[in-house]
Image (spheres, helix red, strand yellow):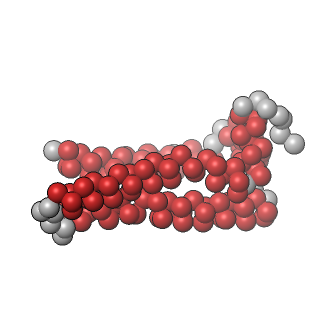
Amino acid sequence: MEKTVSEVLPIGSFIVCSLVMIVCLARGRHHGTAAYRRWRQRYTLEPLGIEQLVWMFVNVCLMTLCLTVPLIVVHTMADAGVVTVTSDEAIQTMRFVDAVCTHAQHCCLSLKVFVYVASSSRFRLELRSIFRLGGLK
């Protein structure tokens, strides 16, 4: 049951979001309200901002791949029965590898904000304005 929910829920939410987007497009709501159009003007990216955004996404993707894929591989191998663990030492090694991979995944999730701050000056400005540490320039 748990596996079914974990596989069906993301697909179901994707389908619902897609249907909502199609309905909004059909009704012409993608043009938005006046407030949305003002927001869109404010957040239109200049070429330098686009380049920073691309590098930020590359950095985040590489970090995510390096820190989360090992855990997926370990769990897939364990679920598929590729690795047969019989001795106590092998069980301890697998638990250690699983713990290290889990910690790496948690580090990845918590490090993303620092990668965003380091990669994009626009993100830093927006973060300051959110926390009221300075105005937008």
**Is 80 on the left or on the right of 61, as rendered?**
left
**Residue 122 visible in this rendered orientation of the protein:** yes
- Residue 35 rendering spot, x and y as whole percentages: 70, 36
Q: Residue furthest top?
A: 132
The residue shown at (24%, 55%) is 92
The residue shown at (50%, 53%) is 108
Looking at the image, is 66 positioned above or below residue 11? below
How many discs mark residues in the rendered view? Answer: 0
- Residue 60 rendering spot, x and y as whole percentages: 57, 59
The residue shown at (61%, 47%) is 113
- Residue 65 rendering spot, x and y as whole percentages: 47, 64
Of residues 40 and 103, which is closer to you in this image? 103
Quadrant of the snapshot with the N terminus: top left
- Residue 87 rendering spot, x and y as whole percentages: 14, 61
**Is 66 on the left or on the right of 3, as rendered?**
right
**Residue 15 visible in this rendered orientation of the protein:** no
Of residues 46 and 27, which is closer to you in this image? 46
**Is 102 on the left or on the right of 54, as rendered?**
left
Q: Residue furthest left?
A: 86
Q: Residue furthest right?
A: 137
Q: Residue furthest front?
A: 89
Of residues 73 and 18, which is closer to you in this image? 73
Quadrant of the snapshot with the C terminus: top right
**Is 74 on the left or on the right of 28, as rendered?**
left
Of residues 135 and 62, which is closer to you in this image? 62
